[in-house]
Image (cartoon, rainbow, N blue to C red):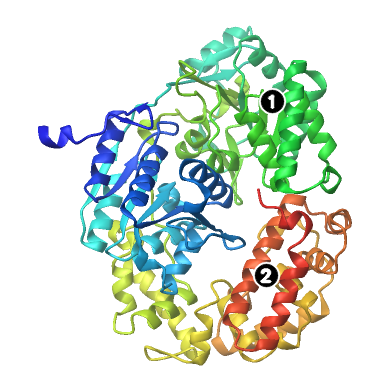
Amino acid sequence: MTKQKRAQRLLRYRGLLLDDFQQEALHHVQQNTSLLVSAPTGTGKTLIASYLIDRTLKTGSRLIYTAPIKALVHQKFDEFCSQCGGGQIGLATGDLTLNAAAPILVVTTEVFRNMLRSDDVRIPSFSWVVFDELHYLDHVERGSVWEESILLKPASMRLLGLSATVPNIDGIAQWIRHVHNEPVAVIQHHERAVPLHHHYFNSLGEITPQNNVLEHMAAADNTGAMDLKGGYLSWDDLGGDLVPDYADSSRFLQLTSYLRRNRLFPAIFFSFNRRDCEQKAKETARQYNLLPDHQKRAVQFVVEKQLRRAGIAKKRIPGFDDHLRCWLRGTAVHHAGLLPVLRRIAEQLLSDGLIRIIYATETFAVGVNMPVRTVCFGSLTKFDGRRRRYLTQQEYFQMAGRAGRRGRDKQGTVISMASVSHLAKHPAPVWDEAHLEPVNSRFSFSYNLILNMLQRFPDRSLEDLLAHTFSVYQNQRPRRELVDELNHQRTVLERLDYVSGTTLTAKGRLACNLYVHTILLTELVYHGVLERANPVQLGRLAGSLMWERRSHLQALPGDPWLLELEVIRDTTARRAQIPPEELAVFQHAAALPIGLWAERKPLEQVLQKSAMEAGDFVQLVRRSMDLLRQVQSAAASPELQQSVEQTLQLLDRDVVKVRV
């Protein structure tokens, strides 16, 4: 970089002295150059986006900011409203839209992807798109959304990608240059603002450095004469599939006492089980009073303020008193099964320094920017839906990286609970940010993507889109495999009369507005099946299609009306020559609570009959409402549109309507 260009760098922004990587990033923003920034958690990547937002407002242009989950979208919306004023910032999450014409629009990545697929008229007005948590490209279920968004963005729209440390960030930038034929700068920063120190917690209530854990723990356990290797099979000999969970959950209170004695609060204790989080929080609150009286009064003030802001009374929140007892003693719990208002209160209390230890699932590390002094792991293994395994390096550092507050802590402390016997049998990975896993493509075709591409670009072959995917660029999946997937779905669309050659039929055009369960919903709308449904039935249909945590609901007898729709699904599948499950899976157990809610039953009764957690239920209702809005948008029948509107009014009430 020339001396003249160095002189153009900002040294300070909003009173903060900028690091070199931030200065370099802001220089590229000033030059209107797309860029990817890869840096550890807590090093100040968001400052770059804040500067870009300020610059966008000053130049009179527009920017769209995307984030992977709604909690993070809401957090960024609040943050940018404080920075720029509420009138300058808009919000769109699928179930909530605020100030959509604002120059800065904060959205979930799915919303942005859907805008691109449908050729939304607002897209040309945006000069920049920000992808927060760009490493979500590697997310097994949602990574394709990010890849599509990058592929389909206009070439004129500049891109700012913010990511935790990614070893192949240069490869991602090269792919974007290849796709859009534009320069893309890469900025990598490897040094943490606050260095991390990694430890295990031994049976004597002491911490042991991870780098020589077995020797230290053996000595501490008075087992120096034990041969830690003799008599054990190697990890390879064991087959490598079932990693035992070596956590000793009975010692977490001892760990809490250690944190207290050594002034290591505030702390996050990560557990991969919701019930475990709740039990640990309650037990900690019973055993320890971690707040003085004046901070208890502050807790009461914050809680009352948040309830007023949300517009909901305590009595409407299941289990509120249990949470309040924990908060008043400096303890909290945080997981997706809680009502959003409870999660928001816990986050605010932690931010205000009124929570000493919070027990959370790993979603807390993705959705909330809450640095603490110490991060604790109840276990370093998790069940990923198929097997129990160790955390990946990316997963570990996504959580561990919350340790250490910039400007307040000299180091971040990471403590993992473990036992010497398990570690001797199954040595844990060496946690090293220099060996993070590369980001891989998760791209896959969908019926809706194919239809929208044919509608927008009838003269551009879908094989051309395929050729530009990150998957093909990486040579990760054989191109033939993706071509087969594309050809299979095109054949299905032709058999069902959605396309004729490269031209969309009436059914195909209708299906363009239905982003999930595209074919089933199109058939139900096109043939007038849904017009005969009442609002409660529409709610039950949406709920049965949108429930994702399938293994967590008790099987129930099939809903008679939904069984009729299953017949339509099966008939359509036979015509398409595909398994019925490829079109949709009806979850009858999820239809029950939605139906009860639409019948205006109280939340307590709904949860009791469904054995569903409050937060999961609220998320299910909101996802169901999002699907119904798609149906409403696609339907030509005024009767169906009106019926859907009635369903939305029935569903959007009480705790569901609370936005925090």
Q: Judge by depth and name the residue closer to the eye, 69 or 231.
A: 69
Type of the residue with mark 1: Asp
Q: Is residue 13 left or right of residue 391?
A: left
Residue 639, quarter of picture: bottom right
The mark total stands at 2
- In the displayed structure, would residue 546 be above or below residue 359? below
Q: Nearer the viewer, mark 1 or mark 2?
A: 2
Q: Secondary structure at mark 2?
A: helix
Residue 365 is drawn in which quadrant?
A: top right
Residue at x-position 29% and y-position 37% = 188
Q: Quadrant of the N terminus?
A: top left
On the image, the x and y values in percent for residue 358 come to: 67, 30
How dense is the environment of label 1, judged by Cα within 10 Å: few (below 14), some, or many (20 and up)?
some
Side of 173 relative to 629 (left or right)? left
Decide which of tag 1 and tag 2 comes sooner along the chain.
Answer: 1
Residue 297, label in figure: none
Q: Amino acid at mark 2?
A: Leu
According to the picture, the residue beneath numbered tag 2 turns out to be: 545
Q: Nearer the viewer, residue 133 or 347?
A: 347
Whether 578 is drawn above or below 51: the answer is below
Say which residue label 1 marks: 248
Is disc 1 in contact with disc 2, using a CB cutoff of under 8 Å? no
Query: Is residue 246 something that shows in the picture?
Result: no
Q: Position of residue 58 (x, y in %)?
A: 33, 49
